[in-house]
Amino acid sequence: MILLCITLMVFLLPTQCLAHQDEELFVNEVYKQLECGELNAIRETIADKQLTAQVYELNAAVEFYSGNYRSAGELLTHAKTLFPGTTVYDDTLGYYQKLESLTSGMEELTTTHFIVRLDKRDTVLKLYVVNALESVYKNIGKVFNYYPDDKVLVEFIPEKTEFLLRSTLTEKDVENSGAIAICKFNRLMLCSPRITLTGYRWMDTLAHEYTHMVVNRLSRYNCPLWLHEGIARYTDTLWRSEKSLYFQDAYEDKLAKAVKTGELISFERMAPSLVKLKNQDEVGLAFAEVANAVDYMIKTSTVTGIIGELLLKAKVTGMRAAFPAVLGVTQEGFEAQWVEYLKKTKLQEHPGVAGDKIVFLDTKPGTGEEPENLGGTDVRGHLRLGDKFVLRKLYPAAEQQYRAAEELEPANPVVLLKLAKVLAVNGNLEDAEKRVRFSIERNPNHGGTYVFLGDILFAQKKWSPAAEMYIEALGINPFNPFVHKNLGVCYYSLGNTVSAKNEWGAALELNPDDLEVQAILNRLAKE
């Protein structure tokens, strides 16, 4: 959930000024207009200008920012014909043409307020993305009292290499930071959960990147990176919850350790982008810090709608002047106040709690199991030994090893899930359910736990609560056909045949060899 606080791709803007305007000021102004979606304003600015090569380049950039890659490429191609003596950026043209080629086979889904582009391998996302996006538009709109007039473009990126191309991030940026999405070029770009090992909260990420777009527009690109990310992280669960859910145990654990060791990351070091921090652990700490700082700002301010007021003031004066005008303190002064507040807060550590780490893969996703890269050395040792016992079906011995790991890291979701599974096999279903419910409280973004709890409830024919767990799981990894299959049974048992058919259709799309689902759908088609 990273916003690249962006140095504009230089080749997207003309190199010469228009009609006596200072070049640097002009480029900065056009940059803001492009990133803030003020495309009509740019069109009006150049409508009466002489058609020079630079005007063609600018028109092409407007088309690019509108998501019209073919038109952008055609304009530059035409400019090369009309102005053979003028250098027109071949790399820009190549970039536009590459994007046009990549998106030509995508399915385009238009909602009331969004345009969504999906690769054919990701069409299962259609089951959920429409309702999620419209909820984001409505509920995030309430937070800022802002509702875009234009349809917002959302592109789900089907491959990691393509994400690097579209985002202009480097391989190192993505690996170090766990960047999975970006708000840039007047659109929201998200990697498909299909290309990650365990998925991620992709609908929250939609809300996160949408919030970045709103902040860009309200502040007219005058919001510093730390505040940008803090607002987005604090806000990105408000589309599905009345209060922010940012303060999870993983964040409290990171803050507690950083305060104790004096290793808080300064707001200055977060610029120009979180992707430039050392690793995903630092990025996670940075998110915890800035979201907490925004929470502190809201709780301590007497100004109603403080965030919106600050952004609107920054739009006119810039954020450096907006802080003392709205909050009565400079940005540096605010950071110092927040650090002192944090030091006085009774923060708790949570041994074993899992942060959100992104792991890409190049093969078909599995069933949502977490990789065994969590926990200390002793914990991993117990897990490995327990796994060996499971393979030999020595479940009581496996339970003993997993319990030993639990004593060391009682909030570790991998430990809790493995222990719950052997407890269930050993006939202790009550304790198994207790473990996974505790894990969900501590690690709400661990998809495999929701699947297992859903399976426990499903086996007891508790259709409604089982469905709730499966829906949560699909909000993290929507590419597990077995979850769709069981959710279809839940819906059908609850009398919701339409939703059942949709889920079974998704299950069959993801697993065409499932003859049972095919038979069910064939039978329903005849009824």
Image: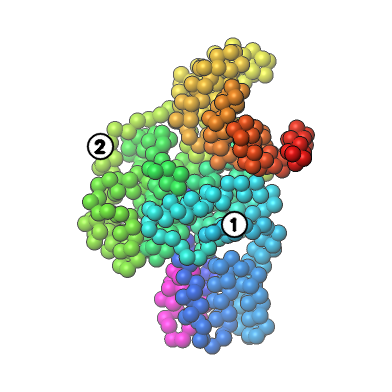
The quarter of the picture where residue 319 lies is bottom left
Q: Is residue 59 visible?
A: yes
Could you say which quadrant of the image residue 53 lies in? bottom right
The residue under label 1 is 116
- Left or right of 462? Residue 320 is left
Q: CA gap, disc 1 to disc 2?
A: 45 Å
Between 269 and 312, the one lying in front of the other is 312
Q: Position of residue 373 (x, y in %)?
A: 55, 32
Identify the residue shown where x is 48% and y is 30%: 440
Give how far across and how far down residue 162 sits, in percent. Answer: 63, 55
79 in magenta: no
**Going 32% across and 68% down the picture, which residue do you hit?**
316
Q: Secondary structure at mark 1?
A: strand
Q: Earlier in the sequence, mark 1 or mark 2?
A: 1
Residue at 47% across, 51% down: 136
Magenta residues span 14-34
